[in-house]
Amino acid sequence: MNTTYPNAAQALSYLPKYITTVKFSGEYVIKDAKFYDKAGPDVYVETPYKDIHIGTALPQFIACLPDTVSKLSFAFKCTHIPEGLVVFSIDGLNNALDSVKRNITSLDLSGMSFNGVSQDKIIRLFWNITPTVKALHINCSASLLINILDVLPDTILRLDLSGIYLGRQNETYFINFLALLSPALEDLDLGSCQLNELAPEVFHTLTSGLPPKLVRLGLSNNNLFTMKTTPIKLANSLRAISASVVEVDLGENYCLSIKSDFLAVILNGFPQTVKRLRLSQSAYSSVEGISPMDGKRLAIKLSKIPSHVDTVIFSRMNFFDLSAQEFSTGLKGLPSTVHTLDFSELTWNSRPFEDLSFIFANLPPHIVAIKLCYNRLLSTNPDTFKKWLHTFAPQVREIDFSGNGFDRLLSSQFNRFSTGIPGRVIRIILDKDQFALQNDGALVAYPSTRHHQGLFKPSGAILHHKQLADFRLVITQFLKSSHLPLNAVALIFSYALESTKQESNHMEKQLAIGLISGKLPARVTTAMKQESINTALARIHSATIAQASKKDLSRCGLNRLDDVELVSALFRKTPNRTTELSLRANGFGQTRETLAFIIQVLRKIPKRVTYLDLSDNGFEDYDAEQLSELFFHLPPTVKLVSLGSEKPLSPADHIALRRYPDSYEELTVHCVDIMQKARTILDDYTKGDSRFWRTVYFHWNRHNTAEVAQIVTRIDQGLITNINDVLSELNLIEKSNDIGSLAKRISFMAKTSLVPIDDEHAEGMEMSTLTSGICGYLM
């Protein structure tokens, strides 16, 4: 790699969104070089040598990677070291690591050959690792490892040391090793380290001194059961593992090949806190003197799993080389206390699709949850995906699809997969903070960079079509009609949805928050007005107790009121620390009367309030002139306002954002459909992706032209076919100017291309979705 390939580096920015890992590999570059030693006055001796390095182009390649790439892997080696004097340099790698962006959270340096590189250069390399990197995989000598651990930042939470030879190290070594591990470490992988060569007392030292916050311990492929110790002593060493450890990896240790009574002793050595156990075998070979594995023998071995283990992990395996029928027979031996099976990172291509369907259709009745993480499920056809999921055993109520790239699909593409999830599956786990539920109950990709204003908010596991913890509007109405105590209703819903204790507690807290529909009744009674006031007072009381700086008066039905002094009295009751006020979804834009009322309310807003949320009141569809008239009544102390899913802006910026140049209309006047209009206005932004024409039009400093050009290209290639996907992709771009040309074009397209959904209709979708979902699961 060298600096003569800028086009190749730029091409990396067009990587598909489902690519999350990029690996740079190759041979070290060998060049002739010379250095000069002073041998006397004006006398220098020339010494030739071979300069071995990886070039200087890595930083520019890394700089061009899209933000969807989160892991970098480097594997450079020097196959033929030349004779004579050689000097190894890893400055290029150092510069590369200095240039990684914040989206890179994982580094794999296990493929790097550091033979010949001076130790001080290697130490400097690891010293400079950026704090945003949370996972690191390295491979080096045991002695060098100690020096590297001494300089690693404490921000590394997942450390993979698999493949480092630690066999035959003494107790002193591991005392030093453990002392250098970060106390914040959560994941430590010691796979393939030949720990079976350790003396029993040394292995005990290792297991008893693990970091206090460690959650996962990897011990795979260490032939632990050949260690020169007894099952009881090995069990005692495993019992010494830190109580914080929840998951242990015993895969590739042929643990299911040893005698059943020995296996029972060893597995029961794990502390009660260990809940997840990996017993995979990527390639199976029987141990001498033991009969080959079959379904019945597998069932006997699995029956020895201790009762405190609730999850068995079969990741990265080929089902012990058994047929689908034999493997299913083996699963029947799992204790009834095991309710989750993890089939992540499987070797899918080695098995016919029919085999996989058979296995998942014949799961034991106590298996209710399946993990299918990092299985490249996007490579399947959506129809095949749907057909496959519908073959799952009927008791399966939870599936984890994390790490399969669904969050990188366009909305319409993701919808084709998500609609294939059977309705009986209650809990769908997807990539954290990347998904939400629309007002109509549909599961959609929703990256955390966007603002989600609907009732359906992502909070960890998504309850398919009915995330009851946030379905507060309908449940509040259900409470009124049922006359049941709050905790009784929470208990009913938690039982129907098989919620965890944490989810049930969250649900009960949500139920305690009163919500009132923003839809104005045909006739507003005095009792209705009082209900709105009482709901708002309860919110203010909660905020006061919590000493919160935000006062949430959203969905209080304040549009029912007609006396502005009542609202003014509510404002006076707010504590002095209140700087944020939410009036979201109160239906202020529904009628002329409610609009006149909110204008009076805006005049009464306390001067200490600097942020105001007016979302879901209908104002998001206002043009610049309408907003000017509305914001005229705001006190000057309000610096930021929210009107919808876009980020909060100042009142002046909201108005400026909606003042569109006449050129937008002129550009699109002859466009025959929405997509042609979108393509035209975006291509005009980049001037045909031409730096020359942007310079001619004095637009040489436009930002995000590469990202916008990519979207235009994908429209031309038929990869983006609807305006919703266009706007979704544009909203993911981090804009340098919130009211700049790109922001205005996005606003113009949204304003002219999409039919606004009024608050009443959106609320109606929420109501119908929740009512049908609740009834379906309570019947």
Image (spheres, rainbow, N blue to C red):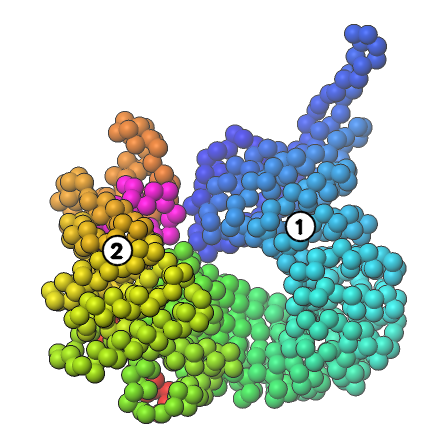
Q: Residue 342: x, y in percent?
A: 58, 74
State the quadrant of the N terminus. Answer: top right
Labels 2 and 1: the sequence-earlier one: 1
Q: Which residues are magenta?
A: 728-752
Residue at figure coordinates x 68%, y 66% from the top left = 214
Residue at figure coordinates x 65%, y 42% from the top left = 128
What amino acid type is highlighted by mark number 2?
Ile
Q: Can you tell which of label 2 and label 1 is closer to the viewer?
A: 1
The disc placed on residue 723 is 2
Q: Quadrant of residue 700?
A: top left
**In the image, residue 477 lies in the stretch drawn in magenta:** no
Kindly indicate whether the residue at mark 1 contacts the one at mark 2 (C-beta within 8 angstroms).
Answer: no
Q: Which residue is mark 1?
A: 153
Q: Residue 241: x, y in percent?
A: 75, 72
- Residues 295 and 490: in front is 490
- Residues 262 and 706: in front is 706
Residue at figure coordinates x 77%, y 40% from the top left = 119
The disc placed on residue 404 is none
Q: Residue 458: x, y in percent?
A: 41, 68
What amino acid type is highlighted by mark number 1?
Pro
Between the C-alphas of marks 2 and 1, the distance is 45 Å
> Quick one: SS at disc 1?
loop
